[in-house]
Structure formats: C-alpha cells, structure tokens
Amino acid sequence: MRPEGPQHLSRHTYVRLTVQQLWENLPSMLLASLLFSICWAPAFFLATLGLWMPALIIGVAITAPGWTALLAQEAEMVLRTRSSIRIMFRAWPRFWARSVGLGLLGCLPLLAMLLTLPILSHPQVPLVAWLGLAADASALLILATLYLYAFPVIALYDADLYTALRSALILASRHIHNSLGLLAMGVLFAFAVFYISPGLLFILPAVWGIFIVNNCRMVVDEEMAQADEETGDQ
C-alpha cells in the first residue's frame, strides 16, 4: 500500500518540509535516536578495540534491524500527526530477518577489505592488492547507495527483501542526483563526528534517516505518477 503524507513532497519542498518535520518531532526523534544508539554502540565499541569479526556480527544482527526500526519510527513521524515510540519496538523484530539479509550483503566486500588492508603496510604492495581494494571499495559504495532505498522501502512499504533490493536498484539508477546528495550528507556527518565530536553519533544518524525516508517517499511518488501517466497515455 502506498502511504500518503499530510503534506506534498516535491523537489521544491523536500528540504523545507523535512527540516520542518524534524523540528516538529524533535523530542520523539531524539528518543528514537537514543534507542538506536543502543543498537550501534556494541558494534562500534568492538570495532574501536579492533575486534572486527564480533563487531561485524553484532552490526548485522542488531544494528541493521535497529536502523530499519529507526526509519520505521521516522516514517510514522512524517506520515502521521502523532507517533508512538512503540513503533520502533514493534518494527525491530518485524523487520529483523529482512534487515539482516541486507546487512549480510555488505559482509563479503567488507571482510575482503579488512583482509586486504594489512597488506598495504608492507614495503612492496602487489598490484593485485590495490585492485582488490578498489573492487571492494566500489562494491561497498554501490551497496551503500542501494541501502539508501532498500531500508526505507522495507520500513515504509513493508516490502520483502527481493522487492526492496529490486526497488532500490531501480530508484538508485533513476535518481542519481538524490543518491549522491544523500551520500554526500552521510560523508559530511561522518566528518562532523570525527572532527567535531563523537557525541554527534547520538543525533546525526536520526537526522540523516529522516532525509532518507522523505527522499524515498518522494521518488516513489514520482515513479508512481510517471507510471500512471504512461498508463493513461495508453
């Protein structure tokens, strides 16, 4: 079912409405962000200790479903005048299997990259190592772009894993500028966490998430409107 928002999203109103919704739902968003921090904190802590495998396992099993639950909570915020934090608690188990499936897709290139990085510290690095690292980085970039749509498609439309990936591939390829903009925002937030304060990790993911949710709503509406026009022309 296609969700309908109380306000019309378009490329002209996207930023303004998203910021407005962010401000209007700030207390709920901060609470949801705090709950999401419980999902990413264990994986982050293990990663800082260099325990990459346990961090990866926890990231896939806990953080990925937590991200979908956060997006589901934010979808409720922007689609309804009122929302309950219980949405997030219900969404985590409901979307767990599909979220883990998405998380597992990123494991192979990430593991390959982690295995390749120590080779770069050698005095002479073989060309194949650089090629492998470039391939892993490219795969992760492609997956990150697909994740911008696959996770919110699940959260917004309760899609199955195959439909979410197929929709993500279509939306990402047809709306490249939107994808690049959201990726740039994520990189900017990462720099803010690194150079300004790690405490921003407790806020910025939720801010990024609401932009991702509204972008997904907007591009899906555009695709639906275009499909309706083509059907009408026939």
Image: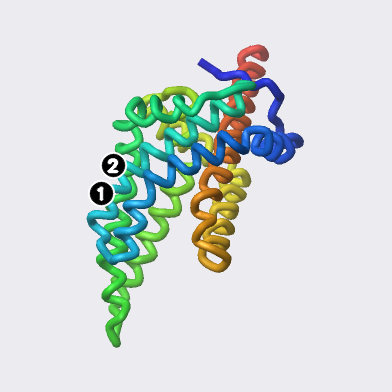
Q: Amino acid at mark 1?
A: Ile
Q: Is residue 216 left or right of residue 46?
A: right
Judge by depth and name the residue closer to the eye, 58 or 38. 38
At 54% from the left and 49% from the top, the residue drawn is 203
Which numbered circle lies on residue 32?
Answer: none
Q: Are marks 1 and 2 in contact (CB under 8 Å)?
A: yes
Residue at image mark 2 = 61
Above or below, comparing residue 118 to residue 178 in the picture: below
Please tell me how crowded label 2 is: few (under 14), some (14-19), or many (20+) other residues with Cα within 10 Å.
many
Q: Position of residue 93 (x, y in %)?
A: 32, 28
Q: Which quadrant of the rendered structure holds the C terminus?
A: top right
Q: Position of residue 113 (x, y in %)?
A: 31, 63
Q: Which quarter of the figure has residue 129?
A: bottom left
Judge by depth and name the residue closer to the eye, 158 or 43. 43
Above or below, comparing residue 34 to residue 113 in the picture: above
Instruction: State the SS at label 1.
Output: helix
At 28% from the left and 48% from the top, the residue drawn is 58
At 56% from the left and 45% from the top, the residue drawn is 208
At 70% from the left and 40% from the top, the residue drawn is 15
Residue at image mark 1 = 57
Please tell me how crowded label 1 is: few (under 14), some (14-19), or many (20+) other residues with Cα within 10 Å.
some
